[in-house]
Amino acid sequence: MPQPDVMEKLVSLCKRRGFIFQSSEIYGGTGSVWDYGPLGVELKKNLKERWWNSMVRSRDDIEGLDAAILMHPRVWEASGHVGGFVDPLVDCRNCKKRFRADDSKIKGTPGTPDAQCPACGMKGTLSEARQFNLMFKTFMGPLEDSAAVVYLRPETAQGIYVNFLNVQQSTRQKVPFGIAQIGKAFRNEITPGNFIFRTREFEQMEMQFFVEPDSAPKWFEYWKAQRMEWHRALGLSENRLEFHEHTKEELAHYARGAFDVQFDFGGTLGFQEIEGVHNRGDFDLTQHQQFSGKKLEYFDQPANKRYLPHVIETSVGADRTTLAALVNAYREETVEGESEGRTVLGLHPSLAPIKVAVFPLMKKEGMPEMAQKIAADLRKDFRVDYDDGGAIGRRYRRQDEVGTPFCITVDVDSVAAGGPGDVTIRTRDDLSQVRVPVAQLKAAISDLLSRDETRATIEALSETWRRV
Ligand code: GAP
């Protein structure tokens, strides 16, 4: 079934509620660069933390790294990016618009009198295709000459390859092992767009797994399965995820084999890559060994042999996966017995920017004081919002719209007999409510947040909390 196009509504929600703003908006904005607001930064941090936990902290065969964005310019010659990271471009001499040469809207061959501009419709105004490098250039030091050129990295992977032996020798890891990092990457994209889907500044979460050459196919299969499972565990719907295998023509210059994890963004975007899993062979280490003149071989002591390991890479965009999580989570629904419907971000609880909201039902009889105390206590462990403004229904809706999985309400009964008595926990997804003693709140919220979904579990759990 085709998925609905929710992008326009999401862009508006993200701005209104402080998830994502256009960069430098008061100056008219910067093309395809975005800033994460208070809720967006929490969401993306949660996503990155899930990745770091699953790749680094929960394993003993992957080490972390945080390499610099600026690297020696020879790195990008060795990696193939100076020569090969290019898109062919054509310009229209009439309307000054620029297109990728392979844009399907261009009729005829650019540079010939027959070719027609897809924007202004003029014939014969399109230039021949020129190669355009996607790397951003800048200068290091005070001289702005060609000897001082450095690049903003277009991928984080190279920082891992050049540190392969530093990490291996300092940690005494043995092949097979991996190195993981999260960091910014920059590409001067010709056709950016679709909100944070394709931007010029973005974050990657990349892991390079170094293996004995003969075992590369086995590890390739292993990482494909692991990575697909990770996306499922984020809550991305099963029917919106699929693999796409690269054909020979699609393969990047470094890859022997590549599978994309694709997500169905709905609307005109449809299924698109969110992660690449690549079998890079020994391309990168061979290149760096040659360009740097330094041996990068691994010494396998038990087998008494030296070799260049092969690399299986997993490369996922933090921003693009954040967008997938938002698209996947967005829903509008009617509420039984209410005239107004509600907008819900059904985010996985671990991704939700705010974990719990605490409300006093009314601003009297000690309810705000008790609610504030509960919020302050819970804040030691969770991101908590306190809200005493407006009707309770409106407050619930505001939290639903930003994906808060649980709301706690302090009411008249909570403060009766001098309180603190029971409070209500209400779930975002099925609107079920349960009374929990204040003393059990922290345990109850921890319990709920550790689960994959918020539906229908709460009733069964409430008895356990009461007995504690
Ligand atoms: N080291 C391999 C590599 O960089 P890639 O397929 O070019 O591979 C990997 O990029 C991931 O990075 C993509 O699947 C996507 O999620 C993200 N990505 C790439 N270009 C992007 C852009 N311009 N904006 C946002 N995310 C991008």
Image: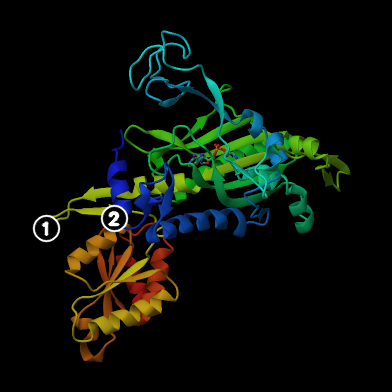
Q: Is mark 1 within 8 Å of ligand 1?
A: no
Q: Which mark is residue 16?
A: 2
Query: Which quarter of the rendered picture does the N terminus lie within?
Result: top left
* Marks 2 and 1, the one that precedes in the sequence: 2
Q: Which residue is mark 1?
A: 337
Q: Is mark 2 within 8 Å of ligand 1?
A: no
In percent of width and height, residue 218 lies at 66, 37
The answer to whether residue 34 is left or right of residue 345 is: right
- Tell us which disc is closer to us: 2 or 1: 2
Q: Choose between 111 and 394: the one closer to the eye.
A: 111
Q: Considering the numbered disc 1 on the image, is that residue within a helix, a strand or a loop?
A: loop
Residue drawn 52% across the image and 19% down it? 129
Q: Choose between 435 and 319: the one closer to the eye.
A: 319
Q: Which mark is residue 92?
A: none
Badge 1: residue crowd in 10 Å (few <14, some 14–19, many ≥20): few
Residue drawn 60% across the image and 31% down it? 85
The amino acid type, in three-letter code, at marker 2 is: Arg
In percent of width and height, residue 152 lies at 60, 44
Res 448 → quadrant: bottom left
**In this figure, what is the number of numbered marks?**
2
The amino acid type, in three-letter code, at marker 1 is: Gly
Q: Choose between 15 and 43: the one closer to the eye.
A: 15
Residue drawn 50% across the image and 46% down it? 202
The answer to whether residue 212 is left or right of residue 182 is: right
Badge 2: residue crowd in 10 Å (few <14, some 14–19, many ≥20): few
Q: How is the image coloured?
A: rainbow
In percent of width and height, residue 27 lies at 37, 49
Residue drawn 78% across the image and 36% down it? 291
The answer to whether residue 407 is left or right of residue 36 is: left
Residue 345 appears in the figure: no
Q: Considering the numbered disc 2 on the image, is that residue within a helix, a strand or a loop?
A: helix
Query: Which quarter of the rendered picture does the C terminus lie within?
Result: bottom left
